[in-house]
Image: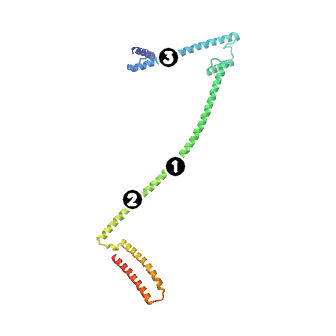
Amino acid sequence: MCEKITKVNSWLSAVFGDQPVPHFEVNTRTVDILYQLAQASEARCSDTALHVEDLKQKASEYQAEGAHLQDVLLQGVGLSCASLSKPASDYLSALVDTAMVLGVRDTSLGSFMPAVNNLTNQLLEAEKSNRRIERELRAVRKRLGSTLVLRSNLQEDINKAVKSQGVESAKAEERLLNMDFVTAKAKELDNRRQRAEAQLESRNMDKSITHQAIMQLSEEVTTLKQETIPLKKKLEPYMDLSPSPSLAQVKIEEAKRELAALDSQLEINMEFK
């Protein structure tokens, strides 16, 4: 634990430099976290230092190779940077810039061609990706258009449904009002009927002269009249016969007796009612 605290303090002092180290609660958890951070920071700093040393070594190699090439040009060909014309210097600068952009080690054709081929492949892949994205974009636009049309149709249907619902609600409300009116009217008529019945009952009205009794009596009279029709039809053949005093008198008497019996029965029914 003490070793971890010592390393953490040393690392914090190195990180903050001249600034004071912020106060923190010293416990097992915070010390472990800061110790892990210190180890990770040291590992990263070590990697960075190695990378810097590698870059320095490559830079020194490039400088040595550049100096060697300058000596070769100066001693073998008699050329130097100062002796180059401006177009040649511009071309050389463009060549160096191109090599730096491509990330090649030197400006030889063997280094440029793979780099250019790599960039060409990347360009082809990017164009292929762009064409695929354009196809997907067209498909999305098509689906978007269909979705917008469907949304418009759905909105129109919703508006129609809302309008129809409003009309139906108005009709339902009107029917409810009519129902309330009819119910109130029926209740009023029922009360009037009850009052009329009570009034008639208080006056000791004969029930035989009520509408219902009269209708029933009318039905019975109609029935009796229907019963007399066959008897009258029996008499019709005898109406055209030549008079036979004895036989006609018998038939007439029989018919009279039947008619008298029916009339008596009718009168009895009328008196009974």
Residue 90 spot, x, y in % from top left: 66, 19
Q: Mark 2 points at which residue?
A: 180
What mark, if any, has residue 134 been given in the picture?
Answer: none
User: Who comes first in sequence, dot 2 or dot 1?
Assistant: 1
Residue under the point 58% across and 39% down: 141
Three-letter amino acid code at the position of disc 1: Asp
User: Who comes first in sequence, dot 2 or dot 3?
Assistant: 3
Residue under the point 43% across and 58% down: 175
Label 2 with label 1: CB-CB less than 8 Å: no
Q: Mark 3 points at which residue?
A: 45
Three-letter amino acid code at the position of disc 3: Cys
Alpha-carbon span between mark 2 and mark 1: 34 Å
Which of the 4 image quarters holds residue 23?
Answer: top left
Q: Name the residue under label 1.
A: 157
Residue 79 spot, x, y in % from top left: 69, 12
Looking at the picture, does residue 76 appear above or below residue 97? above
Q: Is mark 1 on a helix, strand or loop?
A: helix
User: Within 10 Å of the Cα at label 1, are there few (<14), some (14-19), or many (20+) other Cα atoms?
Assistant: few
Q: Which of 117 and 273 is in front in this view?
A: 273
Which of the 4 image quarters holds residue 145?
Answer: top right
User: Within 10 Å of the Cα at label 3, are there few (<14), some (14-19), or many (20+) other Cα atoms?
Assistant: few
Three-letter amino acid code at the position of disc 2: Asp
User: Who comes first in sequence, dot 3 or dot 1?
Assistant: 3
Residue 134 spot, x, y in % from top left: 60, 35
Q: What element carries label 2?
A: helix
Q: What element carries label 3?
A: helix
Q: Which of 32 and 95 is in front in this view?
A: 32
Alpha-carbon span between mark 2 and mark 3: 92 Å
